[in-house]
Amino acid sequence: MNLTQKEIYLLNDQKGTEELCIKKYTNYATQVKDLQLKNMFERHAQQEQQHLNTINQILGGQIPNTNQQPQQQNSQTQTMIKSGMSNQQDIDFCYDLLATEKYVSSTYNIAIFEFNDHNIRLALNHIQKEEQEHGEEIYNYLKSVGAYNIQ
């Protein structure tokens, strides 16, 4: 597989965003007060590591397996979010991570359109879908604790 210079540039950019996500989720997981939020952040950090591994595979010339099943998080999220109270620091971490996930998802959207190989597009689309699921899970948490008001 031969990647174009543009594809290499885009992958390296995504690699950097995945590394940032891993750092944020790992760091925030050690600081949050809500145990359920800690578990969510740790799980997201693991998935972000999988995303980074996929990016590294592609950069190494391998086409990753795209037969991955999306993770079913919504039912798990709904049962885990029942705390009712959250502290401001936890909420701030959630807002930071939600903004990060919005950004990361949008950069995957742009990158997907720039790749020649269909299987790489599928792999990047799978990662983007998981990023969106992370954002949805954070959104649901914020909404459940009354920190995200929809008007």
Image: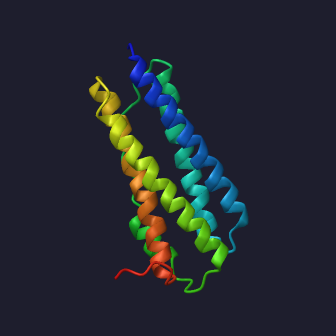
Position of 78 relative to 138 (above/below): below
The quarter holding residue 110 reads top left
> What residue do we see at 60% from left, 41% from top?
19
Horizontal and vertical percent for residue 68?
37, 41
- Total marks in image: 0
Residue 80 visible somewhere in the drawing:
yes
Position of 14 relative to 81 (above/below): above
**Front residue (pair 130, 72):** 130
Q: Quadrant of the N terminus?
A: top left
Horizontal and vertical percent for residue 139?
44, 69
> What residue do we see at 36% from left, 47% from top?
69
* Display colour scheme: rainbow
> What residue do we see at 40% from left, 24% from top?
7
Position of 21 relative to 9 (above/below): below
Residue 71 visible somewhere in the drawing:
no
The quarter holding residue 116 reads top left
Horizontal and vertical percent for residue 56?
52, 28
- Please identify the residue farthest to the top as the structure is shown: 2
Horizontal and vertical percent for residue 141?
49, 73
Position of 110 relative to 139 (above/below): above
> What residue do we see at 42% from left, 18% from top?
5
The quarter holding residue 127 reads top left
Q: Quadrant of the C terminus?
A: bottom left
